[in-house]
Each structure stands twice: as C-alpha cells, then as structure tokens.
Amino acid sequence: MVHIELERKEGDYGFEAKDAHGHVVRLDSNPENGGNNFGVRPMQMLLMGLGGCSGIDIVSILKKQRQEVTGFKMKIDGMRESGKEPSLWKSVHIIFELSGTIDPDKAKKACELSMAKYCSVAETLRLAGGSITWEVTINK
C-alpha cells in the first residue's frame, strides 16, 4: 500500500504532498483558475511521473546491457482534450536524449520496452485513451 499526505499550504489551491519517506512535492492550480504558481499542476505531474518511470526503466535496461549512460534528458510535450471535463491527455510525445557509449539499437529497444511493456504510467495514459509517441537521440 502507498501512503500520501496532502495539505493546503498556500492560498486556495497550493498544496504540499508528502510520501511516507518525507519527499515533498508542491502542487497548485494555474493563475487563471485562482492558483498562485506555488507548485506544479497535477496534470503536469502526471507527465513528470511518466518521465521518471520510463527514465528509470531505460537506464536500468541499458545498465544491464553494459551500456555507459553518462547523460539522460527527456523532453515531454502533451496535448489535452479540449472542451471536456475531465480533460485527459490526448497525445504525448517524448524525446529521449541520451549520451555516452551507447549502441543506438540498444537505446531504441530500451525505450520501446519501457514505453510498451514496463512503464506503468505510460500504460495508465494509454488505457485512458491517450497516444504516446517517442524518439531517441544519442550524443547530440
């Protein structure tokens, strides 16, 4: 079981969420809806979770294949449904930017395994009707 505590800290919509290990994340609504930029929007947090989940998968897979990953960045762009409540993620595009001594085919396969098989956040988004596309660059 996972335990999270959430407490309002700033204005009407500024919250701090804390996990059982004491890690804290700040969340808020956007200013147009009364937020104060106290923290990340909850739907953005979902994309951050996607990045963390797949990043852990990919580095783990590449380490097992004895690939030397000296740098890892991701750019994630998402488009939400318009005119709907709730407004789900409709499409997400990820650019994986890896650096190091990495075989390009192994990098692409590691990303594919994460996106199609291992990343629970990616599967959650897909089951909600979203599409996820991605590309890999190495040493650029």
Image (cartoon, rainbow, N blue to C red):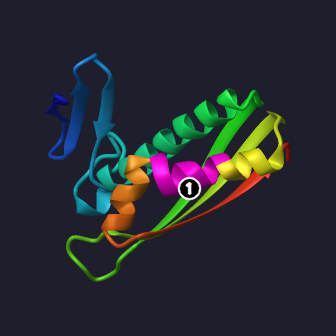
Q: Quadrant of the N terminus?
A: top left
Start-end of magenta stretch: 110-118
Q: What secondary structure is marked by label 1?
A: strand
Residue 74 at what x, y percent from top left? 62, 47
34 falls in the magenta region = no
The answer to which of 139 and 11 lies nearer the viewer is 139
Residue at 52 percent of width and 54 percent of height = 115
Q: Is residue 96 above or below residue 3?
A: below
Which is nearer the eye, 22 or 127? 127
Per the image, the residue denoted by label 1 is 76
Magenta stretch secondary structure, dominant: helix
Residue under the image location 43 percent in, 55 percent down: 122
How many labels were placed on the picture? Answer: 1
Query: Residue reaching furthest bottom?
Result: 83
Q: Residues within 10 Å of mark 1 (few under 14, many from 20)?
A: some
In the rendered image, residue 14, in percent from the top left (x then y), is placed at: 22, 41
Q: Is residue 9 above or below residue 139?
A: above
> Does 58 sit left or right of 40 as displayed?
right
Find residue 102 and report its image quarter.
top right
Residue drawn at x 28%, y 16% is 21
- Which amino acid type is marked by label 1? Ile
Viewer-side residue, 116 vs 125: 116
* Figure quadrant of residue 127: bottom left
Q: Residue at x 54, y 61 (%)?
A: 77
The answer to whether 30 appears left or right of 63 in the picture is: left
- Image location (x, y in percent) of residue 111: 62, 50
The relative height of residue 130 versus residue 121 in the rendered view (above or below) is: below
Left/right placement of residue 91 relative to residue 46 reads right
Coordinates of residue 13 in the picture (x, y in percent): 19, 46
